[in-house]
């Protein structure tokens, strides 16, 4: 469930599961590029020999997994007539399960709140869960804020 809806109906979607994104495989090249971009070359991310006894393989950075929320967006509702949307931040993030190299991940979202800020601005808070294929516990649960401008 997702798409453009009349602004006065946004609150009707609070608590509703919006659906899931496509699956994305997290490979070592992506992890290495993130390590280079952030200067975080901790061995658990880039050294398979050292990481395997601890995690079974190298693992993605938590912030890499979190950043995939932007490029792997779960479906969401948005006000009709929207001209722009931007990331307004996060209220809460909990990393629950490491993402092993080679894992497939996807995000799911549930609308938590709608705040009409006036002047055609709507602040929506979503719970975003990153699932790991074949794992019971998610990689993370986050409360993501998006500002929609109509």
Image (cartoon, rainbow, N blue to C red):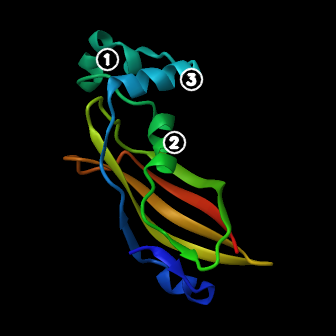
Question: To which quarter of the image does residue 45 belong?
Answer: top left
Mark 3 element type: helix
Q: CA distance from mark 3 to mark 2?
A: 13 Å
Left or right: 130 with respect to 23?
right
The circle on residue 15 is none
Question: To which quarter of the image does residue 104 belong?
Answer: top left
Binning the other alpha carbons within 10 Å of mark 2 as few (below 14), some (14 to 19) or many (20 upward) gives few
Tell me which residue sits at (50%, 87%) in the image.
12
- Foreground mark, 1 or 3, reads 3
Q: Which residue is mark 1?
A: 51
- Foreground mark, 1 or 2, reads 2
Q: Which residue is mark 3?
A: 37
Q: CA distance from mark 1 to mark 3?
A: 20 Å
Q: Where's residue 76, x and y in %?
A: 48, 68
Q: Earlier in the sequence, mark 1 or mark 3?
A: 3
- Residue at the left extreme, as displayed: 134
Binning the other alpha carbons within 10 Å of mark 3 as few (below 14), some (14 to 19) or many (20 upward) gives few
Q: CA distance from mark 1 to mark 2?
A: 22 Å
Mark 1 element type: helix
In the image, residue 87 above or below residue 76: above
Q: Earlier in the sequence, mark 1 or mark 2?
A: 1
Tell me which residue sits at (41%, 77%) in the image.
16
Instruction: Determine contact: label 1, label 3, CB under 8 Å.
Output: no
Q: Where's residue 78, x and y in %?
A: 56, 73
Tell me which residue sits at (74%, 78%) in the image.
120
In the image, residue 141 above or below residue 59: below
Q: Which residue is mark 2?
A: 67
Tell me which residue sits at (30%, 29%) in the image.
101
In the image, residue 93 above or below residue 111: above
């Amino acid at each position: 469930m997702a798409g453009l809806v009349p602004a006065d109906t946004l609150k009707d979607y609070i608590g509703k599961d919006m659906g899931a994104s496509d699956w994305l495989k997290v490979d070592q090249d992506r992890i290495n590029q993130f390590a280079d971009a952030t200067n975080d070359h901790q061995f658990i991310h880039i050294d398979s020999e050292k990481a395997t006894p601890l995690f079974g393989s190298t693992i993605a950075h938590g912030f890499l997994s979190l950043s995939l929320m932007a490029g792997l967006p779960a479906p969401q509702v948005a006000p009709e007539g929207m001209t722009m949307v931007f990331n307004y931040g996060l209220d809460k993030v909990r990393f629950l399960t490491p993402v092993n190299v080679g894992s497939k991940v996807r995000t799911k979202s549930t609308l938590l709140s709608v705040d009409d800020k006036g002047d055609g601005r709507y602040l929506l808070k979503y719970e975003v869960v990153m699932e790991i294929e074949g794992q019971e516990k998610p990689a993370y649960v986050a409360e993501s804020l998006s500002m929609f401008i109509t």
